[in-house]
Amino acid sequence: MNHPTQRVRDYLTGLQDRITSTIGLVDGGSFITDAWRKPPGERLQGQGITQILEDGAVFERAGCGFSQVSGPALPPSATQHRPELAGAPFEAMGVSLVFHPRNPYVPTVHMNVRMIAATPPGGQPVCWFGGGMDLTPYYGFEEDVVHFHTTCRHALDPFGVDKYPRFKRWCDEYFYLKHRDEQRGVGGVFFDDFSELGFEGSFAMMTSVGDAFLDAYLPIVDRRKNTPYGERERSFQLYRRGRYVEFNLVWDRGTHFGLQSGGRTESILLSMPPLVSWSYHRQTRPGSPEDALYRQFLVRKDWI
């Protein structure tokens, strides 16, 4: 039987291959594969595979990265809920993706699944899992949001009917721009520091979430990718992408973990959109589709 860490790695690299292969077929473009390894002597050691599709027919930028790194001490962003592990040597691995569509009617999506293992002084290794997926539309459609959340719920229900409502609430609370008092999108599910089902159960739950991603997102892409749009929709899309950048740089724990631990900056920032704009105190017209996004979709509610 493979070592548990190797099993997690095999699952994650296989997941990355499945997702990028499928998205490449949907788009008609090709992912660039950039395999990397940290040079000897650096504080953080490890390797990874970054895959990027840019300027595609459907996706303006689609990044999907696998990384496996180890270091002498967990950074602060990883120990805020586990202070007893502060300073412990660690290993972390995961797959993270963000897809920025070309058509403003197709939502941006984010998914991440990961495992962290740390060994406190004189203690036994401690493993925990994290992950989830969330949807960020520019123009809201209730059927899309209901489908996305329903798929997330089906992925989690085998592990306890409490998991979807608990992780849905966690997602709403996490993907929230505190400095603007605004949700980033319509949410999904999010969990972190999870080990309560033991290694096997927690690993199985993580894989169920990862396996559900394509089923959750691709039907929405198929419905919206050919919707006609003009400069107004494109301008609003670029403006709303600014919120995505703000969240990832100011609040996202994954970004902070990567940068604080000495990770590979180019791979950590694969989530950034290729084009984005900010404008001062922009207002939406009451009753417009843009206004509906704020009033009907960027709110915390039960979608299913």
Image: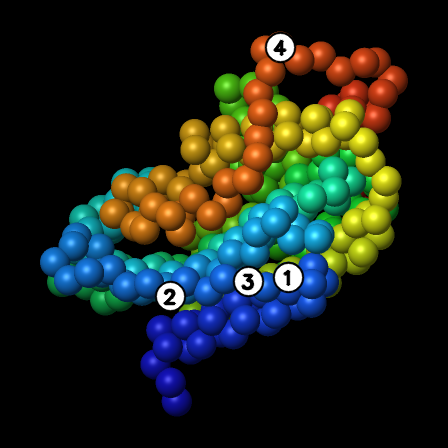
Q: Quadrant of residue 89?
A: bottom left
Q: Which residue is mark 3?
A: 31
In the displayed structure image, the side of residue 57 where residue 206 appears, left or right: left
- Point out residue 85 in the picture as x, y percentages from the top left corner: 24, 51
Indicate which disc residue 281 carries. 4
Q: Residue at x 87, y 18 (%)?
A: 287
- Measure how far apart labels 3 and 2 are at the Cα level: 12 Å
- Point out residue 206 in the picture as x, y percentages from the top left corner: 53, 64
Q: Residue at x 57, y 51 (%)?
A: 54
- Point out residue 86 in the picture as x, y percentages from the top left corner: 22, 46
Q: Tell which circle, 2 or 1, labels the residue nearer the N-terminal end.
A: 1
- Measure how far apart labels 2 and 4 are at the Cα level: 42 Å
Q: Amino acid at mark 3?
A: Phe
**In terms of depth relative to the viewer, which is nearer, 5 or 157?**
5
In the displayed structure image, the side of residue 160 where residue 247 appears, left or right: left
**In terms of depth relative to the viewer, which is nearer, 287 or 198?**
287
Q: Which residue is mark 2?
A: 35
Q: Secondary structure at mark 4?
A: loop
Tag 3 and tag 2, C-beta contact below 8 Å: no
Q: Tell which circle, 2 or 4, labels the residue nearer the N-terminal end.
A: 2
In the image, is residue 45 above or below residue 141? below
- Measure how far apart labels 3 and 4 are at the Cα level: 37 Å
Q: Residue at x 74, y 38 (%)?
A: 104
Which dot, 3 or 4, sits closer to the camera?
3
